[in-house]
Amino acid sequence: MIEQIIRENQEGQRLDKYLHKILPEAPGSFLYKMLRKKNITLNGRKATGSEMLTLSDKVQFFLAVETYEKFRTKQTQNTNAYEKAYQSMNQVEILYENQDILIANKPSGILSQKAESKDESINEWFLGYLLHTGQINEEILESFVPSVCNRLDRNTSGIILFGKTLKGTQLLSKLLKERELEKFYLAFVPGKVQGNVKLQGFLKKDEISNKVNILTKVNEQEKENYDKIETYYKPVSFHSTKIGLLTLLEIELITGKTHQIRAHLASISHPIIGDYKYGIRAINDEAKKFYQIESQCLHAYRIVFPQLEEPFQELSSLVIKAKLPKEMEMLSKL
């Protein structure tokens, strides 16, 4: 008999989904047959597969070792790559952590998730951190892989969210999907921007150019091809610099679509400093020359959690802030 004990990282999922992860090469028909015949049991009792797993549950496999190993995962996690990413990204700052979630300050220039197999992202840093601190091991990674829950552009810095356990991942995913998590950004833009404004529009991504287009209005026939977006901004301060007057904006992301803030501000002639995709090249070149600004001055600096019930009550109304990167900090003092 082979026994697996459910840990915090694994609880909250259906038994049949867990079995598919543990024995991914096994057909579903085989797994359900083994459940019916009590060759796979939960806490010593017959199970259907629909049961929700809880902490310390025992899943027992009354299978020949050869059969069990034949159906085991053939995809091994590259734990060496995770450890390497953790060691190399030592500038990542952890802002908050409990048993279910982790919140960090992502530096500019780091991917949120890998686009290609050769890439290194902050997601690998996160897995390396959990392995390094003993919060997960290779056995846990066979049935549940903790992951980043939101995405920031490579050259956007600031708050990024991770689920350490399944229930933590489910919570963050729900809050993001239902827009219950308030998200605020800071950005430097050229010119003097006055007034508190809610921008509304319609966004469509061009997959070929990896850019988005924004329109203020679309006809009824075209609406299904666009995402409706809302971006709220207000000026925080004004700064006289060698590249002209700049405004530091606080931006609340009401909807969250690809490049939304960058493209929306560019559409009103106030593109983000350092953003070569949507910005003004001449101004960006001057920012690089005088202030060594190599990436867009956009920073996810504050999030506010809603009221939550147990087991997440400690997160209720929690406010997390991430300090500005050095380039934006320098501009803010001019």
Image (spheres, rainbow, N blue to C red):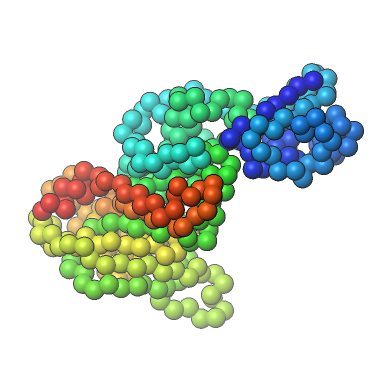
Left or right: 325 as drawn, with respect to 69: left
Where does residue 231 sit, x and y in percent of width and height? Answer: 37, 67
Q: For residue 102, what is the image quadrant?
A: top left
Residue pictured at 18% horizontal, 44% vertical:
292
Residue pictured at 25% horizontal, 47% vertical:
324
Q: In this view of the protein, can residue 111 be seen by the observer?
A: no
Residue pictured at 26% horizontal, 52% vertical:
297
Where does residue 168 sit, x and y in percent of width and height? Answer: 53, 44
Left or right: 289 as drawn, with respect to 221: left
Residue placed most toward the observer, 164 or 228? 164
Residue pictured at 53% horizontal, 75% vertical:
223
Where does residue 83 sit, x and y in percent of width and height? Answer: 45, 25
Q: Considering only vertical position in the picture, is 154 above or below 250? A: above
**Quick one: which residue is furthest to the right in this view?**
37
Q: For residue 111, what is the image quadrant?
A: top left
Residue placed most toward the observer, 247 or 317? 317
